[in-house]
Image (cartoon, rainbow, N blue to C red):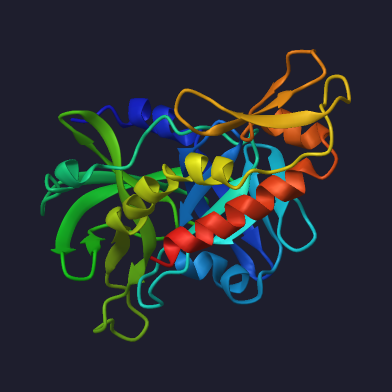
Amino acid sequence: MHDWQRYVDEITQQVVRIETQSGWGTGFVHYARRGGTRCIATARHVVADVLKDKEPFRVWHGSRAFDFGKDTKGALFVQRNDADVDSAMLAVIEQDLPKPRVSLASPEERQEVRIGMEVGWLGFPGLDGVSGQLCFFSGRISFVDESANHFLIDGTAVHGCSGGPVFCVMASGVRIIGALSGYIPNANMPKGGYLPGLAAAVDVSNYKGLEKNLDQLPSQERSLKIKLDECPKCGGRLAERSDRDGQPDIVCQSGCGALIDLLDQDFVRNAPGGAARLRGILVENFRRLVDR
């Protein structure tokens, strides 16, 4: 018997509600970097408008709302993925969004996923009385489709929960193994009757592959040799120098001792044009990586 309350408490802090022009769904932060970059996994159909037209979207974390999109700061937009796979990834710059406590299952841990395994998932169902409230669901894996990277669960999928994390307990602890995608109704449902169907989830491999590529970004960002206008501490001249790893740092030449970290969001927020320049670099590199 799993202590689901314990695992829900662990994962809840990284779950977010995603609002677009046409509706809402659920997502979860699964990757974070020091500079404020956060990657949010969700179902592709939740952010279809964002993918197609780069429309604005809002991310709710608890009672806090963060706006991204056209003419707003910090939007790196989306992983371009196979249109037949219901998974997408938003990359945003917002250090006030949480860093994940529960990680995606590794390829080795993914091999532990089997028919009959009990799993849980979280989402924001559009139901009277609980709309906007994060709810927990559970069921057992009914079918694993290795070729299509998805699986079916003997449970329900309520509107608004799409994109929510599907997780289970492994020998190494609780791990996210996928994201809720939809519900497959019973095709032989009698008129006026009700027969249960199966919930569908996309496999964690649809998100896991990009994490390794994202880990390569710091050196690529630094190698672009950004020229910032002035030192945020004293207004003096900035110059580049190589550190022990051979990557350039930006230092103040006026003697105040400032060492500029290109991933320091507090700095780029205060530097003229700094945030826009950093965002442009991340966008370029992010798209280059997902196009591989």
**What residue lies at 52% left-to-right and 62% top-to-bottom?**
287
Residue 125's x, y, as percent? 51, 54
**Residue 162 visible within the image:** no
Indicate left or right for 235 with 251 as reference.
Answer: right
Residue 209's x, y, as percent? 32, 54
- Say which quarter of the image contains residue 82: bottom left
Q: Quadrant of the N terminus?
A: top left
Q: Nearer the viewer, residue 25 or 187?
A: 25
Q: Nearer the viewer, residue 190 or 229?
A: 229
Q: Nearer the viewer, residue 78 or 114?
A: 78
Seen in the picture, residue 87 relative to 219 is either above or below; the reply is: below
**What residue lies at 61% left-to-right and 49% top-to-bottom?**
92
**Residue 192 visible within the image:** yes
**What residue lies at 43% left-to-right and 28% top-to-bottom?**
9
Seen in the picture, residue 4 relative to 233 is either above or below; the reply is: below
Seen in the picture, residue 275 relative to 146 is either above or below; the reply is: above
Residue 161's x, y, as percent? 47, 56
**What residue lies at 51% left-to-right and 34% top-to-bottom?**
247
Indicate left or right for 2 with 266 as reference.
Answer: left
Residue 246's x, y, as percent? 47, 31
